[in-house]
Image (cartoon, grey):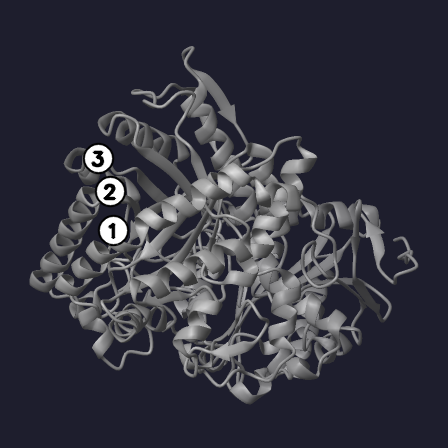
């Protein structure tokens, strides 16, 4: 199992206020440049330590928000491509449907791949509902735009015979010919996040890496769909065709690990503090979802505490009341002593069907920098080696593939 | 003038698209083009208009229960569609009445051809940018909670309240589809087409521009720019109405339009 260390790069000082939103309309006077500089630099120090400890690294992008100071995967990865030595570098991802120029994304990603000597994993995402306003990106037909941008980026990576023409529905170019071309041949791996049947099918068709975020039952569903579709396209994925993102926190004791888990979980609480007007732009959700929302009386405005999650056993629990066991069972937070966390992750992995790439938040929320470092050091020493063995055994037995 | 043939599902295939359409009254044709919310709350106004002519109120492609052809993405498509609809129904001497988003579509239609149009009525039309880049001339409909939006759009916000949770499933689907369609056509540039303003001078039929006196959704300067650009156009305000006079003051708005059309007829009679 590969471990990608991810942090949302949250500007946590702003979380202490009473703001009704941490996204889109929170004034940037709430950002202290001096504190911000420390947070950014701490984060890169953390990633450098992760490289030393044998982990891979994941970055993302959000805009106009105190929940995430990473605004461009290309920028963050450019630094890491030069500073790190071994880590694979995952952008998860470039929100391509929100960017006017997919060729530029392909160019920047290829450049990072060359600079890092082939360590890039190129993740492409649709982006959260709150991203469409800061980027002026029309939420209607966003998926169609996403896939056209995807097709164009793949073509940029794989085309080496001089300029090609692209006059599509959304993007128009006369002479596309990126320099440099990627280091990895035929191209860097492409990772795509998703939750729907249609997305799973396209990911399987393209043989990309499919990634699910936060939530065991829906991850299992997504993985099942990819297996099902892959079979129809005549191939069988191995665990490295899957990724999953969850919070991981270890401590010398269960108690210490759980406390760290709760501190990182603060990220998920604040991530949902979004003013009502920005939560659901028209066209982002399917029509039937919006019909369902309209047919209920207006919501009370409860954010995180009211959010429900489903555990593997089918139990519905609210974040407010969830125990550490519930959080692990739901695949949201794996926390405790090294033995506990190993058990939680492998149980999750067996349930989902074999995830070769675990993206983890072990840094973030209200967890201080020194604690985040202790968290990853302990994990590197006590948990990661065993997880590698777990996946190797799985690859050897091929158990999941038969089940599919 | 052709009668509207309905399909089994109650819709009609007009200019190649299956759309919902209301037809009410008789006499000279009046085409009502709805705002972004579709024909929601428009019954009373359609009733008023039907006192003066045959009202034809299509639900534009993508809105309500009307199909959205995959190739439609701009108000240009809707303007071409309205022209095709007028031709398909063989309508001449049509008074087009458009409110808000529908006013935008009406203006886009009229800059292309007024061959079948006799009068144009734009009620709080969207569609143009008249001021400086930093002036927000049209409030951001996707940046406001519903209560705040109603405060800007209505003189009496209570008149804008809709009990969505009491609606039938099919109706709700129409509401959601209208929200999506408005975003599809109006997301960027926000609720305007930069081409429209420079061609408004091509409109050569008697034009009435109506503004609710309490409209806080569109700034007055924006609406006045329509008046300045359309030669000979008449401007009127409706009291106790916000952005949707046809919802808040259906009879006053209906009477204003009826009076305007009658005065134009008198003028024509005098010159003859």
Residue shown at 90% from the left, 53% from the top: B2
- Relative placement, left or right, of A247 versus A240 is left
- Disc nearest the viewer among 3 and 2: 2
- Relative placement, left or right, of A12 versus A343 is left
Work out whether residue A263 can be spotted: yes
Q: Could you tell me residue B255's position as x and y percent?
A: 68, 79
Separation of disc 1 and disc 2 at Cα? 8 Å
- What residue is pinned by disc 3? A81
Residue shown at 46% from the left, 74% from the top: A326
The one of A334 and A181 positioned closer to us in this rendering: A334
Residue shown at 58% from the left, 45% from the top: A400
- What residue is pinned by disc 1? A380
Separation of disc 3 and disc 2 at Cα? 15 Å
Question: In what quadrant of the picture does the N terminus of chain A appear?
Answer: top left
Separation of disc 1 and disc 3 at Cα? 22 Å
Q: What's the chain of the residue with tag 3? A: A
Q: Is residue A15 above or below residue A334?
A: below
């Amino acid at each position: 199992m590969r471990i990608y260390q991810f942090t949302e790069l949250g500007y946590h000082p702003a979380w202490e206020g009473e703001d009704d939103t941490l996204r889109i309309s929170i004034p940037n006077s709430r950002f202290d440049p001096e504190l911000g500089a420390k947070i950014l630099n701490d984060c890169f120090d953390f990633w450098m330590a992760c490289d030393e400890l044998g982990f891979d690294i994941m970055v993302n992008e959000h805009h106009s928000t105190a929940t995430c100071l990473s605004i461009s995967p290309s920028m963050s990865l450019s630094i890491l491509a030069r500073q790190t030595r071994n880590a694979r570098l995952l952008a998860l991802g470039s929100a391509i449907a929100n960017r006017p120029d997919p060729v530029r994304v392909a160019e920047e990603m290829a450049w990072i791949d060359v600079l890092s000597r082939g360590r890039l994993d190129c993740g492409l995402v649709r982006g959260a509902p709150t991203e469409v306003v800061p980027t002026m990106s029309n939420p209607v037909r966003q998926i169609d735009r996403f896939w056209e941008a995807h097709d164009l980026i793949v073509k940029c990576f794989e085309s080496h015979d001089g300029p090609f023409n692209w006059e599509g529905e959304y993007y128009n170019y006369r002479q596309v010919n990126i320099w440099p071309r990627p280091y990895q041949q035929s191209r860097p791996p492409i990772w795509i996040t998703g939750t729907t049947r249609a997305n799973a099918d396209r990911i399987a068709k393209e043989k990309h890496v499919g990634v699910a975020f936060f939530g065991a039952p829906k991850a299992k569903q997504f993985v099942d769909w990819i297996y099902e579709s892959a079979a129809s396209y005549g191939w069988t994925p191995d665990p490295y065709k899957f990724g999953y993102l969850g919070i991981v926190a270890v401590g010398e004791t269960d108690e210490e690990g759980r406390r760290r888990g709760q501190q990182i979980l603060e990220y998920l609480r604040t991530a949902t503090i979004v003013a009502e007007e920005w939560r659901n732009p028209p066209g982002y959700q399917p029509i039937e979802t919006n019909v369902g929302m309209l047919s209920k009386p207006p919501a009370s405005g409860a954010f995180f505490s009211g959010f429900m999650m489903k555990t593997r056993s089918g139990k519905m629990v609210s974040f407010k009341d969830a125990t550490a066991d519930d959080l692990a069972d739901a695949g949201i937070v794996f926390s405790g002593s090294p033995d506990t966390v190993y058990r939680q992750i492998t149980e999750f992995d067996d349930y989902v069907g074999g995830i070769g790439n675990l993206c983890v938040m072990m840094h973030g929320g209200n967890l201080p920098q020194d604690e985040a470092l202790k968290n990853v050091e302990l994990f590197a020493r006590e948990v990661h080696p065993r997880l590698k063995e777990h996946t190797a055994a799985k690859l050897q037995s091929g158990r999941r593939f038969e089940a599919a | 003038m052709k009668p509207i043939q309905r399909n089994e599902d109650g819709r009609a295939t007009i200019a190649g698209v299956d759309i919902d359409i209301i037809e009410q009254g008789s006499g000279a044709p009046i085409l009502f083009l709805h705002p972004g919310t579709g024909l929601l709350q428009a019954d009373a106004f359609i009733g008023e208009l039907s006192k003066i002519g045959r009202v034809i109120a299509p639900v534009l492609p993508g809105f309500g229960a009307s199909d959205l052809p995959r190739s439609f993405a701009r108000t240009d498509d809707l303007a071409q569609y309205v022209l095709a609809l007028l031709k398909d129904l063989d309508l001449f001497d049509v008074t087009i009445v458009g409110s808000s988003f529908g006013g935008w579509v009406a203006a886009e239609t009229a800059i292309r051809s007024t061959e079948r149009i006799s009068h144009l009525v734009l009620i709080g039309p969207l569609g143009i940018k008249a001021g400086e880049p930093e002036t927000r001339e049209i409030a951001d409909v996707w940046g406001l909670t519903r209560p705040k939006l109603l405060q800007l759009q209505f003189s009496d916000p209570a008149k804008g309240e809709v009990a969505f949770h009491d609606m039938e499933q099919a109706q709700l689907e129409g509401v959601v589809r209208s929200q999506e369609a408005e975003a599809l056509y109006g997301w960027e540039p926000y609720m305007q087409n930069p081409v429209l303003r420079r061609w408004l001078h091509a409109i050569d039929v008697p034009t009435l521009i109506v503004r609710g006196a309490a409209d806080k959704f569109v700034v007055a300067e924006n609406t006045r720019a329509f008046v300045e650009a359309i030669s000979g156009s008449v401007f009127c305000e409706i009291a106790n109405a916000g952005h949707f006079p046809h919802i808040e003051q259906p009879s006053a708005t209906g009477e204003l339009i009826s009076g305007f059309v009658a005065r134009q007829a008198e003028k024509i009679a005098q010159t003859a």
